[in-house]
Amino acid sequence: MSPTHVPPSMLEASRIKSLATEVGFDLCGITTAGFLDGEESHLREWLEAGCHGTLGYMERNIDKRLDVSTLVDGARSVIVCALHYPRVRYNATATDKIASFACIPDYHKTVKEKLHQMLVQLGVSGRAFVDSAPLLEKQLAINAGLGWRGRQSLLITPEFGPWVVLGELVVTEVVDMYDEPFGPSRCGQCRACVQACPAGGRALIQDSVLDVRHCVSYLTQQGSGNSENLHGWKWGCDECLNACPYGK
Ligand code: SF4
Ligand code: SF4
């Protein structure tokens, strides 16, 4: 659509995506702001089963998680951006492993700065989020066409596998073209992440359902693990990410 056909209050998707590339994001997709009705029952069942462990904040603000327009008055669109980060490799006997996301400069800061640059250059009102508010970012990324939910519950992108961090801009403008939600999972018959998980079926209890209480990453961050159940991880855990063929 040429600029002359775009009403003044409407943002152009092509401009948003060029800007995302200019500020350094690797992926960008755009979806509508609205109630994520397909997610409510999953979220409530997961919480009722206690799969969130002691992450009490997950129980709060459920309505906000399901609908970004409760976070930003008049929200119409969500711009989801992803930044690829490199994987750190350890040998099999290492006992001081730190997850790759924790080996890069604080992504909260980096991603938020990039999102703010985009907001300023777009000249629109809205808010930038990076893990900073109750927001179902994986589902928003799927809706924005960036990837699918892998068997280990992470977002998997065709380009970088699971090796991305996400940030979102929730804006009050309509966009001239929204992305289609990503199609079905591309996991196929692969179960590499489940097979690689040190906690096995106790953490990955069903396809795309994680019980954090047994997840090594959670245990390291809660300080509640021990040398037997941490499998050499000091902070986080990359085993299910390392196993994913889309991230090789
Ligand atoms: S982070 Fe580690 S423990 Fe948690 S699901 Fe992935 S492989 Fe399993
Ligand atoms: S390792 Fe295999 S099953 Fe797991 S998320 Fe990647 S493709 Fe899907």
Image: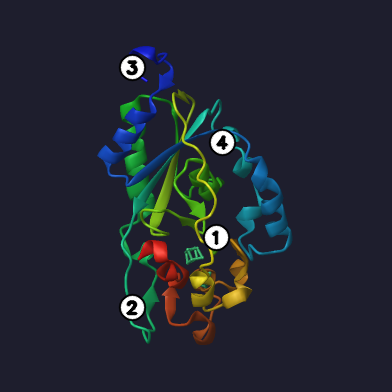
Residue at the spot 65% in from the left edge and 49% down from the top edge: 60
Image mark for residue 90: 2
Callout 1: SS: loop
Callout 4: SS: loop
Callout 2: SS: loop
Q: Distance from label 2 to label 4 (Cα)?
A: 40 Å
First-in-chain label (2 vs 1): 2
Image mark for residue 3: 3
Q: Which mark is nearer the camera, 3 or 4?
A: 3
Quarter location, residue 2? top left
Please give the count of numbered marks on the rendered protein.
4
Q: Distance from label 3 to label 2 (Cα)?
A: 50 Å
Whether residue 148 appears in this view of the structure is yes
Residue at the spot 35% in from the left edge and 66% down from the top edge: 248
Q: Distance from label 2 to label 1 (Cα)?
A: 23 Å
152 and 169: which is toward the camera:
152
Q: Distance from label 3 to label 4 (Cα)?
A: 30 Å
Graded by Cα atoms within 10 Å as few (under 14), some (14 to 19) or many (20 or more), the crowding at tag 4 reads some
